[in-house]
Amino acid sequence: MMRDGRKKLIIDTDCGSDDAMAIAMALNDPAYEILFFTVVSGNVEAAQAVQNTLLTIERAGTYEPPVYVGAEKMLLKELAFAWETHGTDGMGDLGLKPERLRPAEGNGVLRMLEALRNSEKGEIDLVTLGPLTNLALAIRLDPEAVKKAGRVTVMGGAGFGGGNVTAAAEFNIWQDAEAAKIVLEAELDRIMLVGWDACLGESMLMPEDIRRIERGSSLGKFAVEVNRILMGLNRERFGMDCLDMADPAAMAAALCPDCIKTCEKYWCEADVSPGPGYGNVLIDRYGFSGREPNAWICSQLWPDRYKDYIFRTLGV
């Protein structure tokens, strides 16, 4: 299952500024080999997210996995980009572009399926940082191939708290709730949702954490600078520089399970009904449905372990 002692990984991303930090962390974890990235529209359109992924790979300075573009549209819903959080380019509107790298030829969904078909069961883990459109399309095309994946970690859902784009919904699920419904109904053995609530409270990056990251390495400085718009929003909301980093939280939960404090299995379903509940992940916490649990819900990280993992992988 491992080559050179490293676990194989595919990362699906709509690369905005918090994805960039998460991707940089993964590229610097010696226990994992990222086979390739698949890109989906979400924070920004897919073509821009590809450029952001390539830029982050260059800045990480480790190795250079291929980057494939996948779904450019959601299954049904009109796209609504997160420009107010990440900038119109998804990376803080700093004018940054990759210098050398170019996207790989081929479709990301088909490349994901090819890799899974040719793998042993459990050999490849998946981490999704954006809307679940690519994964849902893969399931529709070949559900048995997707079931060969090992752990599937999804940054998605509001967990047991409120949403970050509506009162009920977290952005990634809300952006394509129909895709999330397909994924949650696919009977994947080891799927874990890391909700929005996992990056809040003591797990937020506070001013002293941000200073350490920014001053500790060139990669850390990059990771902070591209999140400048989000930090400005939080300065208005909380009166200080802080970062609620959902994608790094999901990446830490996926790659460093010791960071996980609370994770339990429940029956879950994505709400696709029109109205204020659209995009909410319904979690049957008390078993009212009588349905068998179908997903693990990670709602809390150990703050010190999580932050130490960020510091270690960003070289600070």
Image (tube, rainbow, N blue to C red):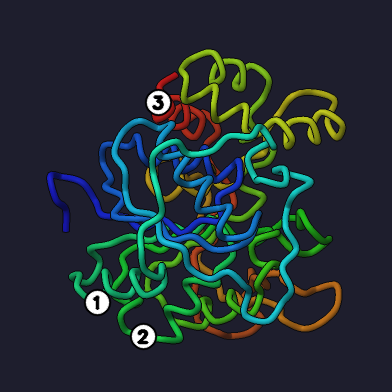
Looking at numbered disc 3 in the image, what kind of residue is underneath it?
Arg
Dot 2 or dot 1, earlier in sequence: 1
Q: How far apart in space, not on screen, are marks 1 and 3 (Cα)?
A: 34 Å
Helix, strand or loop under label 3: helix
Q: Quadrant of the N terminus?
A: bottom left
In the image, what residue occupies the spot 55% across and 53% down?
49
Q: Nearer the viewer, residue 307 or 303?
A: 307
Residue for badge 1: 117
Q: Relative to residue 72, is residue 142 depicted above or below?
A: below
Query: Total label count?
Result: 3
Q: Which dot, 3 or 2, sits closer to the camera? A: 2
Left or right, 7 with respect to 17, comes to: left
**Looking at the image, do the residues carrying marks 2 and 1 touch, with CB atoms under 8 Å apart?**
yes
Q: Relative to residue 197, is residue 266 depicted above or below?
A: below
In the image, what residue occupies the spot 87% across and 31% down?
236
At which x and y percent is residue 88? 72, 47
Helix, strand or loop under label 1: helix
Residue for badge 2: 142
At which x and y percent is residue 310? 47, 31
**Looking at the image, do the residues carrying marks 3 and 2 touch, with CB atoms under 8 Å apart?**
no
Q: Quadrant of residue 109?
A: bottom left
At which x and y percent is residue 198? 61, 47
Q: Which mark is residue 283?
A: none
Left or right, 277 with respect to 257, comes to: right
Q: Which dot, 1 or 3, sits closer to the camera? A: 1
Dot 1 or dot 3, earlier in sequence: 1
Residue 162 seen anywhere in this rendered image of the structure: no
Q: Which mark is residue 312?
A: 3
Label 1 crowding class (10 Å Cα cut-off): few <14, some 14-19, many 20+? some
In the image, what residue occupies the spot 31% across and 65% down?
150
Q: Nearer the viewer, residue 88 or 173?
A: 88
